[in-house]
Image (cartoon, rainbow, N blue to C red):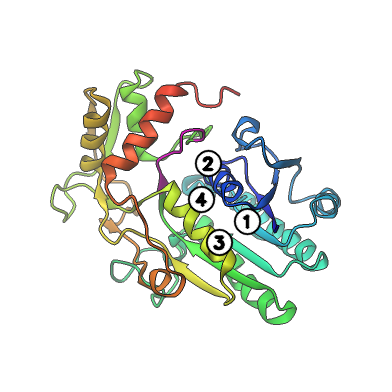
Amino acid sequence: MSTIFVTGGAGYIGSICVEQLLNEGYRVAVFDNLTEGHRKAVDTRADFFQGDLSDRTVLRHAFDEAKPDAVMHFAASALVGESMSNPSKYFRNNVANGVNLLDVAVESGVKKFVFSSTCATFGIPERVPLDETLPQQPINPYGESKLLFEKILRWYGQIHNLNFTALRYFNAAGATEKFGEDHRIETHLIPNVLKVALGQKESVDIFGTDYPTPDGTCIRDYIHILDLAQAHILALKSEKSDFYNLGTGGGTSVREVIDACSEISGKKITAIEKPRRAGDPPRLVAASDKIRTELGWAPKYQDIRQIVKDAWAWHVKNPGGYGD
């Protein structure tokens, strides 16, 4: 039975990938510093190590105990706006600490590394949907830090014979019955809209209503968290090092998301129209032809209503999130 070492396994995406790995029969060791994640979000079937990737001694101890066969790396700082005001945090956490993880993984004889990357490495794309051939030109330190780590992965693959898969995506959404989205600083649209439905916020903002899209609002790519977890598990089994974009191919507008949240919750959602935000492209959607063809990824939840339905069910059951 393979053991997977999951960094950031107490976070939103990491916790659900841990749950699905366990369901598939893997042993899982979670490593998280709990600055963004939640202890209650760690599946009780997993081993848990609290520590920071900046501390190689703690990291080595966790590897010695867990004896992992592979690493899944989710731990990262991921707020675009914050990266523009505090780039140091992003390059230290997403790059330097990532190198610590790679070094300890190599020292421990790990041969497979799955990296949770981002389509933000492409910046403002020349065309959509984004495929893997587009030039990567990040427009913020967050995207740059992830791109730097992708480049480092290439070299570790070449020099240390480390097999790796990097998965790039935009917006993870939805929930499972047990685990859902609870960020201390919530920037994602769906949970913020659902907070209005829960009565925790008075309204939600729409930034820009004059984009060249069918309803004038920005279109973004939302992937159900279960489809995302499935892609990470398929990546574990891949014997070829590569980079893959993950997306639905279509995308959903801000208004469509709000309408779906209203429909599923049965609540009126008050939306406030505001001017565009600087740097927001009209449409960001990823193509996933390559991973579908090469790894057999077949997303099951393409309807925004199903994604919202699962997210809403979790938030109704956990209105205070994980409560820590």
Query: Which badge, 1 or 3, comes first in the chain's sequence?
Result: 1
Residue at the (18%, 44%) spot, across then down = 209
Residue 40 image offset from top left, x and y in percent:
62, 30
Q: Residues within 10 Å of mark 4 (few under 14, many from 20)?
A: some
- Viewer-side residue, 236 vs 196: 236
The residue labelled by disc 2 is: 12
| Residue 84, numbered label | 4
Disc 2 crowd rating (10 Å Cα; few below 14, some 14-19, many 20+) is many
Asked if the residue at tag 2 contacts the one at tag 4, i.e. Cβ–Cβ closer than 8 Å, the answer is: no
Q: Is residue 130 above or below residue 320?
A: below
Q: Earlier in the sequence, mark 1 or mark 2?
A: 2
Q: Amino acid at mark 4?
A: Met
Residue type marked 3? Lys
Residue beneath label 3, please? 146
Residue 275 drawn above or below residue 116: above
177 in the magenta segment: yes
Disc 2 residue type (three-letter): Tyr
